[in-house]
Image (cartoon, rainbow, N blue to C red):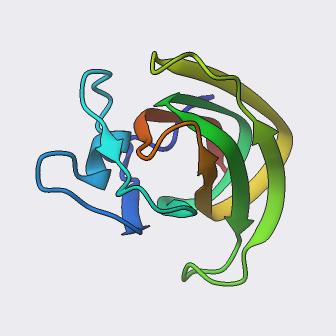
Amino acid sequence: MFDVALKSAGAQVVLATSSDDKYPPENIIDGDSETFWTTTGLFPQEFVIKFTSMMNMSKVELASCNVRRLILEKSMDSEPLNFEPIKEIEMNSHDGQLQSEEINLGNVQAQHLRVVIDSAYDHFAAVYRLHVDGTAAH
């Protein structure tokens, strides 16, 4: 298993509901834990990761700040359409400090992963890193 959501592995952020030139959504998959994407303050907020091909995903790790309720969805289509729910998580508050969440998926196939921040502990939330353990589906 390796991180199939890295930009260097060919993954792309194909949609994000907010963008700031200083904190672009591509920061989520750049592999640098010092950079981040920030939301604009209204919820829900979301981003969609496109993998290079169909992937078998086993685990998602998220480093974030102020995220309260998180929803993971998958699409098996070649375009980011027809998403199906995978998991919904209530995250603990860390008073503005870094949150780290490990989400076991079992074995889920997807071409796209949508991450929805449904609510937050503050007006703004940030995602520092998304790590997806996976392998190419055969």
Q: Is residue 123 visible?
A: yes
Taking 44 as reference, is 65 left or right? left
Q: Residue at x 44, y 46 (%)?
A: 123
Can you say which quadrant of the picture contains the N terminus?
top right
Q: Is residue 27 above or below residue 95?
A: below
Residue at point 36%, 52% (across, down)? 10
Residue 41, compared with residue 14, is above or below; it is: above
Nearest to the observer: residue 58 or residue 93: 93
Q: Residue 40 falls in which quadrant of the image?
A: bottom left
Residue 100 picture location, percent across and down: 58, 19
Name which residue lies at 38% across and 52% down: 39
**Is residue 82 depicted above or below 91 in this figure?**
below
Residue 137 shows up from this direction = no
Give the residue at x 52% y 32%: 66
Residue 64: percent from the left, percent from the top? 48, 30
Left or right, residue 15 beside residue 91: left
**Looking at the picture, how far across and down is residue 6, in whole percent?**
39, 40
